Image (cartoon, grey):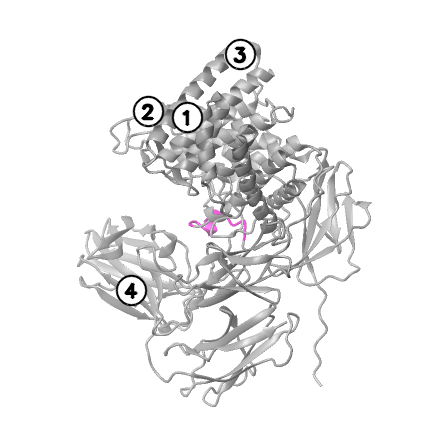
């Protein structure tokens, strides 16, 4: 008799806490992240140094999240102020943390330091006084004043004084759609300035730093108004990883002056709101005595200037509603949404009821969408919270209804996982929408006193301070383990091997993506603090910071500081709604069945985004999503909602990845079609000229030739020895199962020669042969046989094109497509004798599906896959030693299924014939 080996003891991978600390009276929670179930006797305690200060704590098993078993520890009852604490579970210790009377107040100086360090046109030592914040910036951050020559007209013939403002991110661009952040700073003072910790003056100039910073941003808006009279323009960043003073010469009128682009009235409307909020903040500071009486007249004059500018910007945007919105626009309601921010702030500034009437009309016409949180994409929630105290009775009703729906979403979405993070993962970090929702939830608590919101905000900010499965604080400089390799040109070694990273106080990076942008087969969600030298093209997706990413954190920290020791423990959580399948990281194909479970306490289950009713049966609701039209490796989110007895909605989300096709002659794998299509091309990048051997220059542009979207590879050699190297950044592709690299191209340059190399992690192969090849001037598909290189691991293939000219003449190569292909041949395999586990099935009963694979040619399968409800599971040989496929070989796959009625089929290919699929089996009931 064969007996199963004993289960190995679970290992705790890490213990996580808020490395930013906790407030004494606040909610305190940490996690143990393990690879399996922990014994009931697992120890739990809190230490200070090596002294045990809390001898025991309770582990709450939160089940499996993202492949880990997660245990939650609530130690809110421990309130002793001190530092050097650690949470220890099963002998594994967390990073150290502190407990303060008000931990949030300790990071306010970093919030304003961030903006000072992002100032354009100002030397760092002038913007950031020595010792300004408790966390100091790296020495390498310090730079001279840059971009003193901003900016020239689109054609470069006229100069406008557009110095100042804040760099949006690490690329030195300044964008109209993000100019609402000056208003956000002013509003933080207006909402919380009566709290002494908020009205700080760390530069000792007699003015609260929040008012200082709001005015600095407003000065840029007024320069834009002086230059153009109403429209707002972007000034985009450019150049390499150098300090800003090296990007241009700082001399007005020279060729390197940055040029304006992307005019939009969305920026005009947001500028109006920011100027109005700044004028309000200045007057509030004067009235409260935060600005000395001797300085009041000068600052009142600035408030008047800001008010006049706010009105002028508003009038322009209001009368040009049909003009382009511009970049970073309000995608949730267009120009009316941008103007809502202005109307609310202008009403609060002037008392003019017309502004309120217009704002309330916009609010009444605004449909709720769960995608909505305050940021450049939607000014609604902040504007509503600001207007509520002075709204009409009807306006208050509309505002509370909207904001309550948003809170319902926040509370139920953040309960999808134990970590309290909004469940919206995509190809850019989750932290930007997450902290934006947290700021909105805090404002809801301020208006309506719902303690559930205050508790959710605390937990949600612990996520960015390190209470996450990576144990990483995404706020620069905070905690033992924080993001080091920020994506910023202030770090001049940021893309150099051996770079050590940078500290920029207050910077919050974008954080986890749904997948590793360099590895589409990675775990989900994914994060790594990866140096720029290892990821030149994609690092911004997870380690970029910006004024918009930081804005929600900024607001929430000031608000929590003002909240102090307010109670947070009461209130009933929303009814849990679980999407059992698909799960994040699942690869799907065709028709995907979505399973939602919530017992009988939720009714009316519906599938977003259009809220299509789902079919309910036995406590399970199902809906369908067809992914057959989506490109391979598309990452997407499914939203489900149910209705509670109160009428409130409860939400849950799931994420999936569209599987690439199985490799067959009928399903080539398009890598780049040079029209934003293909695995690489869909990212919107062009190939790059990394290197030129023996001098010369190269360039790639995407263009149209002969009615085809093509990549134009150009070389201007210095001599006939010059070689230009082109790559799709450092991107790799899983081309396993494909035989040919097929490139459709032509070249009008008779002297041009092309060498193509395909490499993996360990080897490099010249697939064009030992000598470069000439390319015909007619469209021709060249098939390069990868089977000729048995040492090549096609699952991690990287491509390189080299151009060389036989004489010192320019050369052009037009590439229409790069793809991986197969030839048809042989006999198609057969799948037979498909079966699954018999008897009564439950979610705790693993289900095994078996099938017989037979191939008359004796060809092994590329893969045998079990597709259950559209989710793909790999099958493995029952007898790995059985490699005679002519008489059949058994394959099996074992899965755990959620409650509900399931269907499945098995599919395979030998790569030289079409996909073979077994008949669909339906009615597999799991109770």
* Circle nearer the N terminus (1, 4): 1
- In the displayed structure, would residue 298 be above or below residue 199? above
In the image, residue 538 sits, relative to residue 458, either above or below, namely: below
Q: Is residue 685 left or right of residue 413?
A: left
Q: Secondary structure at mark 4?
A: strand
User: Which of 176/825 is in front?
Assistant: 176
Among numbered discs 3 and 4, the one appearing first in the sequence = 3
The percent coordinates of residue 509 (x first, y second) are: 52, 43
Q: Is residue 828 magenta?
A: no
Q: Which residue is mark 4?
A: 743
Instruction: Please give the residue where the numbered disc 2 appears in the rendered image.
Output: 227
Mark 3 in CB contact with mark 4 (< 8 angstroms):
no
Residue 237 occupies which quadrant of the picture? top left
Q: Residues within 10 Å of mark 4 (few under 14, many from 20)?
A: some
535 in magenta: yes
Q: Residues within 10 Å of mark 1 (few under 14, many from 20)?
A: many
Provide residue 693's location: percent of width, then percent of height: 31, 52
Which residue does the numbered mark 1 point to in the structure image? 220
In the displayed image of the protein, which residue is found farthest to the top?
Answer: 294
Q: What residue lies at 49% left-to-right and 14% top-to-bottom?
A: 300
Which residue does the numbered mark 3 point to in the structure image? 295
């Amino acid at each position: 008799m064969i007996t199963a080996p004993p289960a190995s003891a679970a290992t705790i991978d890490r213990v996580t806490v808020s490395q930013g600390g906790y407030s004494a009276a606040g909610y305190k929670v940490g996690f143990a992240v393990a690879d399996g179930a922990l014994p009931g006797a697992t120890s739990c305690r809190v230490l200070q140094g090596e002294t045990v200060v809390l001898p025991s704590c309770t582990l709450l098993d939160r089940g499996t999240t993202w492949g880990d078993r997660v245990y939650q520890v609530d130690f809110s009852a421990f309130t002793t102020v001190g530092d050097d604490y650690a949470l220890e579970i099963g002998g594994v210790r967390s990073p150290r943390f502190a407990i303060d009377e008000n931990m949030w107040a300790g990071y306010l100086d970093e919030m304003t330091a961030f903006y000072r360090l992002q100032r354009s046109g100002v030397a760092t030592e002038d913007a950031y006084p020595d010792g300004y914040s408790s966390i100091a910036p790296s020495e390498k951050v310090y730079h001279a004043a840059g971009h003193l020559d901003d900016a020239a007209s689109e054609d470069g013939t006229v100069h406008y004084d557009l110095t100042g403002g804040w760099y949006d991110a690490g690329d030195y661009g300044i964008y109209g759609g993000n100019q609402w952040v000056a208003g956000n700073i002013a509003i933080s003072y207006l909402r919380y300035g009566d709290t002494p910790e908020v009205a700080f003056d760390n530069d000792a100039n007699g003015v609260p730093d929040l008012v200082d910073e709001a005015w600095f941003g407003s000065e840029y808006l007024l320069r834009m108004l002086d230059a153009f009279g109403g429209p707002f323009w972007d000034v985009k960043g450019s150049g390499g990883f150098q300090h800003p003073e090296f990007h241009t010469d700082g001399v007005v009128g020279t060729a390197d002056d940055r040029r304006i682009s992307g005019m939009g009235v969305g920026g005009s409307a947001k500028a109006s709101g920011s100027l109005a909020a700044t004028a309000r903040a200045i007057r509030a500071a004067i009235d409260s005595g935060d600005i000395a009486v001797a300085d009041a007249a000068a600052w009142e004059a600035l408030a008047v200037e800001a008010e006049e500018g706010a009105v002028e910007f508003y009038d322009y945007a209001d009368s040009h509603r049909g003009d382009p919105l511009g970049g970073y626009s309000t995608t949730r309601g267009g120009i009316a949404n941008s103007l809502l921010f202005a109307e609310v702030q202008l009403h609060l500034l002037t008392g003019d009821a017309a502004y309120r009437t217009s704002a309330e009309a916009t609010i009444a016409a605004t449909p709720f969408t769960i995608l909505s949180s305050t940021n450049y994409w939607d000014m609604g929630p902040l504007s509503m919270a600001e207007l509520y105290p002075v709204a009409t009775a009807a306006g208050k009703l509309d505002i509370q209804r909207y904001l309550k729906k948003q809170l319902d979403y926040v509370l139920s979405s953040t309960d999808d996982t134990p970590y309290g993070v909004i469940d919206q993962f995509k190809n850019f970090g989750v932290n930007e929408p997450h902290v934006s929702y947290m700021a909105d939830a805090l404002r809801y608590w301020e208006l309506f006193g719902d303690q559930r919101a205050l508790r959710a905000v605390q937990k949600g900010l612990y996520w960015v301070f390190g209470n996450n499965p990576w144990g990483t604080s995404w706020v620069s400089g905070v905690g033992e383990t924080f993001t080091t390799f920020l994506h910023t040109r202030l770090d001049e070694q940021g893309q150099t091997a051996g770079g050590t990273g940078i500290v920029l106080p207050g910077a919050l990076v974008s954080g986890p993506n749904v997948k590793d942008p360099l590895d589409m087969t990675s775990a989900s969600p994914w994060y790594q603090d990866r140096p720029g030298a290892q990821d030149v093209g994609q690092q911004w997706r997870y380690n970029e910071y910006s004024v918009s990413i930081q804005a929600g954190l900024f607001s929430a920290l000031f608000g929590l500081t003002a909240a102090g020791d307010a109670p947070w423990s009461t209130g009933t959580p929303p009814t849990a709604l679980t999407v059992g399948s698909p799960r994040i990281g699942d690869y799907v194909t065709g028709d995907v069945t979505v399973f939602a479970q919530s017992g009988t306490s939720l009714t009316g289950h519906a599938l977003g985004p259009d809220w299509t009713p789902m079919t309910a049966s036995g406590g399970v609701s199902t809906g369908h999503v067809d992914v057959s039209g989506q490109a391979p490796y598309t990452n997407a989110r499914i939203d489900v909602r149910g209705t509670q007895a109160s009428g409130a909605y409860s939400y849950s989300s799931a994420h999936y990845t569209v599987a690439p096709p199985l490799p067959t002659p009928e399903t080539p794998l398009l890598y780049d079609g040079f029209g934003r299509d293909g695995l690489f091309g869909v990212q919107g990048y062009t190939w790059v000229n990394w290197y030129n051997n023996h001098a010369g220059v190269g360039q790639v542009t995407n263009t149209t030739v002969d009615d085809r979207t093509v990549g134009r590879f150009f070389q201007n050699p210095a001599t006939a020895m010059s070689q230009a190297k082109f790559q799709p950044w450092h991107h790799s592709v899983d081309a396993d199962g494909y035989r040919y690299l097929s490139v459709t191209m032509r070249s009008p340059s008779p002297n041009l020669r092309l060498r193509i190399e395909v490499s993996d992690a360990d080897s490099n192969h010249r697939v064009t042969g030992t000598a470069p090849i000439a390319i015909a001037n007619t469209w021709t598909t060249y098939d390069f046989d990868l089977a000729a290189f048995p040492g090549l691991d096609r699952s991690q293939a990287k491509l390189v094109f080299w151009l060389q000219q036989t004489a010192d003449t320019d050369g052009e190569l037009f590439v229409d497509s790069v793809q991986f292909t197969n030839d048809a041949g042989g006999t198609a395999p057969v799948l037979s004798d498909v079966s699954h586990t018999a008897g009564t099935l439950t979610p705790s009963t693993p289900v095994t599906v078996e099938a017989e694979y037979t191939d008359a040619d004796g060809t092994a399968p590329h893969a045998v896959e079990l597709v259950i409800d559209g989710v793909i599971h790999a099958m493995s040989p029952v007898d790995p030693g059985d490699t005679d496929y002519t008489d059949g070989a058994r394959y099996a796959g074992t899965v755990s299924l959620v409650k509900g009625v399931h269907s499945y089929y098995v599919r395979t290919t030998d790569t030289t014939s079409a996909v073979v699929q077994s008949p669909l089996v339906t009615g597999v009931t799991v109770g």
